[in-house]
């Protein structure tokens, strides 16, 4: 199944006060680490959505192999990046996997298992269920092409969760061991991430 990966990295990092995409992590930047995960997933197409600090990201982060989408409306929430990226999704794409640019702890094996589970299901939505299937849901998310029209209607920061939790579409849940990988929104998150990888 032709699959497009989309990494959301357009946030303004308002709670940090500096671009979190460029925070140092494992000898590179936080976004470099997240893109390394995405590349390891071997998607047929990889898109990264930029917005806040876009020019700095372009001059600092290795974006090779990525289709870069600039989201002029990044301040309205991450759903605007999904909407902006949809126009760049390859017409052959049968599915879209959504990853966060500030969540480098996602395992490529989990992404692959999610893809396989969703491709074998008739549900148009897929999500990871951490804690071995007993914990909370978390990224990555999987969307069949039949969901693209609904994704285009998104507004705000948590709109994709509203689609997932609406009950309007069946959802495939992939059990994943461990806790939801840390996503960096605050300095506490960042230090927790650093502590967890030392």
Image (tube, helix red, strand yellow):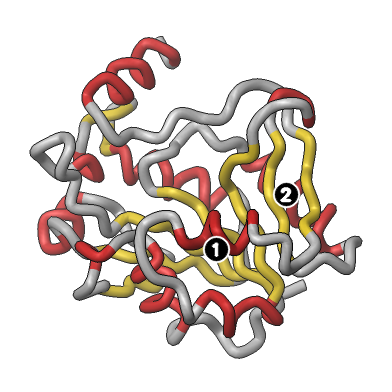
Rendered-image quadrant of the N terminus: bottom right
Q: Which residue is mark 2?
A: 112
Q: Nearer the viewer, residue 76 or 63?
A: 76
Q: Residue at x 44, y 13 (%)?
A: 196
**Residue extending furthest toward the bottom:** 91
The x, y position of residue 193, in whole percent, is 38, 21
State the residue in front, 183 or 89. 183
Residue 197 lies, with reference to residue 32, above or below; the image says above
Image position, residue 92 (x, y; %): 66, 86
> Would residue 120 be visible to someone looking at this image?
yes
- Residue under the point 64% across and 32% down: 136
Q: Left of 36 or right of it: where is 32?
A: left
State which quarter of the image contains the C terminus: top left
Label 1 crowding class (10 Å Cα cut-off): few <14, some 14-19, many 20+? Answer: many
Q: Give the image quarter of residue 168.
A: bottom right
The span from disc 2 to disc 1 (Cα, nearest Å) is: 12 Å
Sooner in the amino-acid sequence: mark 2 or mark 1: 1
Corner quadrant of residue 142: bottom right
Position in image of residue 71 (x %, y %):
26, 72
- Residue in the image at 34% along x and 65% along y: 49
**Residue at the spot 51% in from the left edge and 81% down from the top edge:** 89
Task: Identify the secondary structure beneath mark 1.
Answer: strand
10 Å crowding of disc 2: few (<14), some (14-19), many (20+): some
Q: Are marks 2 and 1 in contact (CB under 8 Å)?
A: no
Disc 2 on helix, strand or loop? helix
* Residue that carries the numbered disc 1 in the rendered image: 5
Q: Is residue 106 left or right of residue 164?
A: left
């Amino acid at each position: 199944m032709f699959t497009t990966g989309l990494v959301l990295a357009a946030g303004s990092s308002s709670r940090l006060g500096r671009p979190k995409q460029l925070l140092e992590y494992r000898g590179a930047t936080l976004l470099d680490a997240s893109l390394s995960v995405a590349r390891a997933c071997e998607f047929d197409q990889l898109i990264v959505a930029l917005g806040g600090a876009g020019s700095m990201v372009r001059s600092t982060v290795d974006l090779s192999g990525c289709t870069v989408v600039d989201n002029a409306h990044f301040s309205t929430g991450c759903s605007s990046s999904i909407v902006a990226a949809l126009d760049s999704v390859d017409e052959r794409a049968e599915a879209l996997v959504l990853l966060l640019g500030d969540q480098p702890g996602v395992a490529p094996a989990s992404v692959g298992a999610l893809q396989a589970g969703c491709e074998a299901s008739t549900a148009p939505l897929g999500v990871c269920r951490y804690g071995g299937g007993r914990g909370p849901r978390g990224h990555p998310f999987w969307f069949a092409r039949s969901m693209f029209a609904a994704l285009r209607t998104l507004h705000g920061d948590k709109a994709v969760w509203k689609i997932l939790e609406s009950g309007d579409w069946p959802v495939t849940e992939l059990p994943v061991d461990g806790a939801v990988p840390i996503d960096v929104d605050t300095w506490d998150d960042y230090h927790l991430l650093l502590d967890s990888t030392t």
